[in-house]
Image (cartoon, rainbow, N blue to C red):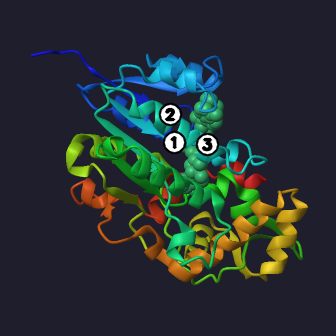
Amino acid sequence: MSTEKKILVVFGATGAQGGSVIQSLLSIPNSPYQIRAITRNPTSPRALALSSLGITLAAADLNDAASLTSVLTGAHAVFLVTDFWADISAPTQEIEQGRRAIDVLAAIPTLEHLIWSSLPSIKDASGGKYSAVVHFDGKTEVTEYIKGRHEKLWAKTTELWIAPYYQIWISNRVVFGPKKVIDDGREVFVLSSHAHGSVKVPMVDVKETGLVVSAILAKGQDLYTKTVSMIGCDSSSQAENLAMWGKYLDRDVLFNYISQQTTEEYLKNLGMPEYLVRDLVELPLALEEFEGRLYRKKGIVLANEVRAGRKLRGWEEYVKGENWEGFLKD
Ligand SMILES: NC(=O)c1ccc[n+]([C@@H]2O[C@H](COP(=O)([O-])OP(=O)(O)OC[C@H]3O[C@@H](n4cnc5c(N)ncnc54)[C@H](OP(=O)(O)O)[C@@H]3O)[C@@H](O)[C@H]2O)c1
């Protein structure tokens, strides 16, 4: 029997999703995979940190097909994620990157399993009512491209939908997190939204991506052509989440329901391009209208099912495990 390990190529290796995939694979004793971590810059501090763990780095750019062919040659399994936010001046770039990678992957004879990190189409789910959320819909376009152009590749693909991260309060506070305001000498953390506080937005701890991806790889062909939906285990509302956070950290909090126009002006003042303002205005409206249903569809497989019923972390567990020191100071 061959003892040679299979090659798992991980895109976004220096980022949240890919980084979690690598951490999880590293923790599996006798993992059948040898990791090939993709980065545009193998000398960045994050890339060097991976290298110091003994991970093999390979340089590639999703904008460059030749570099993709080079790093995908010999791959047995691939975790593919595109980063919409890397260049917000180019709204269709992520679709082009996804298609480019898919064309290359379709020609890799060794490939056994592709895990494609996508998102549900809000345009389709809403019957066209919300058609501006391009950072969701673009990923679905790539999924449709696999199905339509590369049937044989689709036959060994698992699509993964990851809900908004709990971590976006910290990583993207300016848009999604509570801001500290001083009100009458009192410090209050205010979460403003034009979606009501009672809305139950499905969220998840992105650091658990690797647990789900490892489970998908272990299930192999059982999950080919399936969509796995990664949402956390609780169903509390935005206002309840905020209240729990405030209570745990002993801080005053306020959920502030604002008008759509106020959000629009706020985002415009941040210098966001017009299309992205529309995207970020429609997203909370769609989440309000669909709540958890957006991440469920006929035939979907929930991440908890893939993990034999073991639940993903809920908000409270995440809050208690996070370091809020810098967040509270800013
Ligand atoms: N935030 C959320 O709540 C959420 C939820 C679900 C899905 N998503 C989606 O997740 C994606 C981002 O993933 P993430 O959060 O893991 O990213 P992240 O932590 O911001 O890191 C971005 C990763 O993408 C890589 N990258 C960027 N441009 C690249 C290119 N041209 N070629 C090759 N690699 C490139 C970077 O690698 P190097 O810099 O090392 O080259 C880095 O590893 C976005 O498309 C977003 O829409 C986000």
Task: Determine whether, in the image, residue 82 is placed left or right of residue 231.
Answer: right
Quarter containing ligand 1?
top right
Task: Determine whether, in the image, residue 67 is placed left or right of residue 223.
Answer: right
x then y, percent, for residue 35: 39, 24
Q: Which residue is mark 2?
A: 11
Rendered-image quadrant of the N terminus: top left
Where residue 240 sits, quadrant-wise, is bottom right
Look at the numbered disc 1 and give the secondary structure of its residue. loop
- Work out whether residue 177 can be spotted: no
Query: Which of the pair 279/184 is nearer the observer?
Result: 279
x then y, percent, for residue 191: 71, 72
x then y, percent, for residue 318: 49, 57
Q: Residue at point 51% right, 23% down?
A: 50
**Which is closer to the viewer, label 3 or label 1?**
3
With respect to residue 107, does 272 lie above or below?
below
Q: Looking at the image, do the residues carrying marks 1 and 2 touch, with CB atoms under 8 Å apart? A: yes
Look at the numbered disc 2 and give the secondary structure of its residue. loop
Task: Determine whether, in the image, residue 221 is placed left or right of residue 167.
Answer: left
Q: Few, some or many C-alpha atoms within 10 Å of disc 3 (few <14, some 14-19, many ≥20)?
A: some
Q: Few, some or many C-alpha atoms within 10 Å of disc 1 (few <14, some 14-19, many ≥20)?
A: many
Question: Label 2 CB, ligand 1: below 8 Å?
Answer: yes
Task: Determine whether, in the image, residue 69 is placed left or right of residue 183.
Answer: left
Query: Which of the pair 209/228 is nearer the observer?
Result: 228
What amino acid does circle 3 point to?
A: Glu
Question: Label 1 CB, ligand 1: below 8 Å?
Answer: yes
Comes first in the chain, label 3 or label 2: 2
Comes first in the chain, label 1 or label 2: 2
Q: Which residue is mark 1?
A: 81
